[in-house]
Amino acid sequence: MPDDITVKDNHIYGGWRQPVNISASVKDSIHDDETAQKLGMRGGTVAGNIHLEQFPPVLLKAFGPRWFECGSLSMYFTYATKDREEVRVVMDVPPEGAGDAQVETWMETADGHTVCKGTASVGTPGQPTSLDSIEVKNAAPEELRILSGLKAGDKLPPREMTVTHEDMSERLIVITEPLDWYQGNSPWGGAIATPTLMFNAMRVDFQLPIKAVSFQGAAELRNLAGPVKVDVPYRVGGEILSVGASPKTEFYWFDAWLEDRDSGKRIAELRLMRRFMKASSALYQDDK
């Protein structure tokens, strides 16, 4: 655990960190400087799932190891950061003595921007998470170009996957907040997956053939019978929740699940909103 976590005025403050834009070399993406600046961004952006990896030390301070077993982190992204810009996690202190609880949490930059905001919980607090509270709506089919043909209820075919030690070794080179448990000797008997590796494991939407620059608009990780472990075979699948449009983007929400390959026990879930920029698509060139 880092030694720079502080508690003040009913808030838990994580230390200032500098997340690395590990996808900066991916051309024609929101993460490379040239493409991002053409689309009106300040530069190549750090992916939202990388930011999720900064929360565990504060989650452990708030909820203890139980968060990895039955905790959630539900965040809406509001400000894109660039490579190594300083950010920190802030979280409300849970009610004293509460076994199950949900609190507000956010990430902020040194100059006062809110990178993401939402809720963190453990157990069954009896209230909706930040993303559960959002009423998702579908656009009329004629409003969609980039996501034409995609609709709520579409299944994302299941597949088998394993978070390997090689995956973990690559993450640990650039991880924002390393924990010893990611390398082994955890309370659950072996190495556990980082939030980013949990997220990546459930990205079953990558199989969709969509041609436009995209970014993560919101994400929720839920541990149901966690943690997700390294070198354990799982089965993952998902379903489109809704398909919508805004003035600058088309987007979809999807729910994904991860279960034990052999027993079928549900281990974790992901809800993700993925936005596609209209300005990056040839389907909108005539509108300029």
Image (cartoon, rainbow, N blue to C red):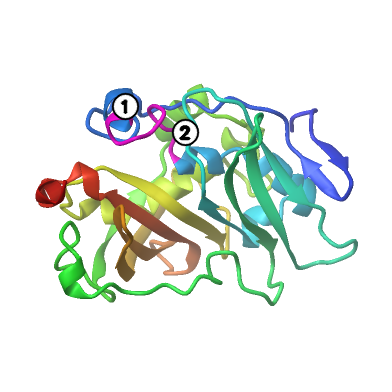
**Could you tell me the amino acid type at mark 2?**
Met
Helix, strand or loop under label 2: helix
Instruction: Say if 73 sits above or below 28 in the image.
Output: below
Q: Which mark is residue 168?
A: 2
Q: Residue sitting at 89 percent across and 64 percent down?
A: 97
Query: Is there any visible trace of residue 160 in the rendered image?
Result: no
Q: Is residue 40 inside the magenta stretch?
A: yes
Q: Tell me where residue 231 sits by quadrant.
A: top left
Q: Residues within 10 Å of mark 1 (few under 14, many from 20)?
A: many
Q: Is residue 278 visible?
A: yes
Q: Nearer the viewer, residue 56 or 170?
A: 56
Residue type for callout 1:
Asp
Residue 16 lies in what quarter of the image? Answer: top right
Decide if residue 148 is on the left or right side of residue 194: left
Q: Does 89 appear above or below 146?
A: above
- Horizontal relation, residue 140 to residue 80: left or right: left
The x, y position of residue 78, in whole percent, is 51, 48
Which label belongs to residue 32?
A: 1
Residue at 31% of width from left, 27% of height from top? 32
Q: Give the residue displayed 23% in from the left and 28% down from the top.
A: 27
Give the x, y percent position of residue 157.
24, 64
State the image coordinates of residue 182 (x, y, percent, origin top left): 58, 36
Quarter of the picture containing the N terminus is top right
Residue drawn 74% across and 29% down? 2
Query: Alpha-carbon distance for marks 1 and 2?
Result: 24 Å
- Name above or below for residue 170 compared with residue 234: above
Circle 1 SS class: loop
**Residue 3, quarter of the rendered image:** top right
Magenta residues, start to end: 37-47
Left or right: 240 in relation to 273: left
Q: Nearer the viewer, residue 172 or 155?
A: 155
User: Which residue is situated farthest in the front direction here?
Assistant: 288
